[in-house]
């Protein structure tokens, strides 16, 4: 594995530690929280080490007082009493940049009470995205570039991936241990082991005693539907569970950062929209072990191919939006009669909107932007631009405000 990979979150953490007494990094297990936290800290308390955990448990206030600061408290959920100590410390000494906490994504579910409300600023972290893997973390997010200059700040390298290359990147995933595995076999083994851990152990840790066989079936149904809007009935029928169990599974899997529901978008100008959320695996690489397929199988299944690319693009957007100064939020749009559908709606804090369509096509044509034209004509001044993200090698303009851009523009 290479040395430290600069993360999109690094500048945000610098700002956090300069402006606030304490911060909390949340995210899935093994996404790199501890490694990144250490880059922003002078001292370290590792509570997954029994001796350090015992010392903190005996007197958390004394353990924190020794610093040095900024102090990283890693795996804080092992000794949840440390939260109360952080609260007391911050209340008594509100100097900036004192504590950074990291821990399991299960902690929000398992911890009884939360004494640190108003004292910890929470920051979400995910697996590596392509901009980080390609050493482009210092570039502005694609959404920011498009809002500022349209197509003018979009450039693509000569070695842009083809469709097979994009599928390979999607199935490689962003967890460091998988992304930097020595070969595909080792990567698939690691990802499969991660899923096994989720269904057999992680859910029991959060207090949800579930049937791992049924939970795996539910996850498989979600993997087969990633990037889609399946009904709850479709999912529960596939998994052989009832609605209450599915609701519980959704909450658990989202707390563990395995799945995500992208909400449907609505606006005063639009009515008769589908309200179902779009389902995504947070890391599309889990499609491989959950469905038992590889890149060749994906490329033979046009429906799954399109939805896998959708989830891959959303993974890039999710990370970009987390650090964007425009504070964008992600939605999807589909009307009830199926005439209009936009894969991703990016809504900025000021209410302006960008539409994104994802196409597994190297040569998109004007017809591929028809839903974006409809969105533009419907929204008027709120509409910033429409983007067809494709697997071809070059960006170009369909018409004013409607562009075709290679997916690799996120990082190239």
Image (cartoon, rainbow, N blue to C red):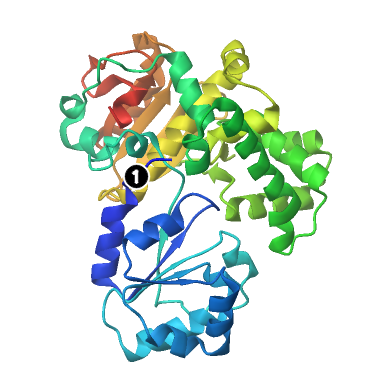
* Nearer to me, 1 or 115: 1
Give neighbour class at mark 1: few <14, some 14-19, many 20+ (Cα, 10 Å): some
Q: Position of residue 219 (x, y in %)?
A: 70, 39
Residue 302, placed above or below residue 219: above
Q: Residue at x 45, y 56 (%)?
A: 33
Q: Residue at x 27, y 29 (%)?
A: 385
Report which quarter residue 233 is drawn in: top right
Identify the residue position indicated by label 1 in the image. 5
114 lies left or right of 125: right
Above or below 291: residue 211 = below
Asked if one can make out residue 207 in the rendered structure from this viewpoint, the answer is: yes
Looking at the rendered image, the quarter that the N terminus falls into is top left
Q: Position of residue 104 (x, y in %)?
A: 56, 61
Please state which of residues 271 and 408 is positioned toward the viewer in this rendering: 408
Report how many numbered discs are placed on residues in the image.
1
- On the question of residue 268 being in view, the answer is no
Q: Is residue 232 left or right of residue 105?
A: right
Q: Residue at x 32, y 33 (%)?
A: 134
Residue 200 at x, y percent in the picture: 75, 50
Residue 173's place in the image compared with 96, above or below, is above
Residue 133: horizontal and vertical position, in percent?
A: 36, 36
Classify residue 88 by image quadrant. bottom left
Q: In the picture provided, is 21 more to the left or to the right than 199? A: left
Q: Quadrant of the C terminus?
A: top left
Relative height, residue 94 to residue 257 (above, below): below
Secondary structure of residue under mark 1: loop
Asked if residue 226 lies left or right of residue 126, the reply is: right
- Of residues 367 and 14, the one drawn nearer to the viewer in this rendering: 14
Q: Nearer the viewer, residue 309 or 84?
A: 84
């Amino acid at each position: 594995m290479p040395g430290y990979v600069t993360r999109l979150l690094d500048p945000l953490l610098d700002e956090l530690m300069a402006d606030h007494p304490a911060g909390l990094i949340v995210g899935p297990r093994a996404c790199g929280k501890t490694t990144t936290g250490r880059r922003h800290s002078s001292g370290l308390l590792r509570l997954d080490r029994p001796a350090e955990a015992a010392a903190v448990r005996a007197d958390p206030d004394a353990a924190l007082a020794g610093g040095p600061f900024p102090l990283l408290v890693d795996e804080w959920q092992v000794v949840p009493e440390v939260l109360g100590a952080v609260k007391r410390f911050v209340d008594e000494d509100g100097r900036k940049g004192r504590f950074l906490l990291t821990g399991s994504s299960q902690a929000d579910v398992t911890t009884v009470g939360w004494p640190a409300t108003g004292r910890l600023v929470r920051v979400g972290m995910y697996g590596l995205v392509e901009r980080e893997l390609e050493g482009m973390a210092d570039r502005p997010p694609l959404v920011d570039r498009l809002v500022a200059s349209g197509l003018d700040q979009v450039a693509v390298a000569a070695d842009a991936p083809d469709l097979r290359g994009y599928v390979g990147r999607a199935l490689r995933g962003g967890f460091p241990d998988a992304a930097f595995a020595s070969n595909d076999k080792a990567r698939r083994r690691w990802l499969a082991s991660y899923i096994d851990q989720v269904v057999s152990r992680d859910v029991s840790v959060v207090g949800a005693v579930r049937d791992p066989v049924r939970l795996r079936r539910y996850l498989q149904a979600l993997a087969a539907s990633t990037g889609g809007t399946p009904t709850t009935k479709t999912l529960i029928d596939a998994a052989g569970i009832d609605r209450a169990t599915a609701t519980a599974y959704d909450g658990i899997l989202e707390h563990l950062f395995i799945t995500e529901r992208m909400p449907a978008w609505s606006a005063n100008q639009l009515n008769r929209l589908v309200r179902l959320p779009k389902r995504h695996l947070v890391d599309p690489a889990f499609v491989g072990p959950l469905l038992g397929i590889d890149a060749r199988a994906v490329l033979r299944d046009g429906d799954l191919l399109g939805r896998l690319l959708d989830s891959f693009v959303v993974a890039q957007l999710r990370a970009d939006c987390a650090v964007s100064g425009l504070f964008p939020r992600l939605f999807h749009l589909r009307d009830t009669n199926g005439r209009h559908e936009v894969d991703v709606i990016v809504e900025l804090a000021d209410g302006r909107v960008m539409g994104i369509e994802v196409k597994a096509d190297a040569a998109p044509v004007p017809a591929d932007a028809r839903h974006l034209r409809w969105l533009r004509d419907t929204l008027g001044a709120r509409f910033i631009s429409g983007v067809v993200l494709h697997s071809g090698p070059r960006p170009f303009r369909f018409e004013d405000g409607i562009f075709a851009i290679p997916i690799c523009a996120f990082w190239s």
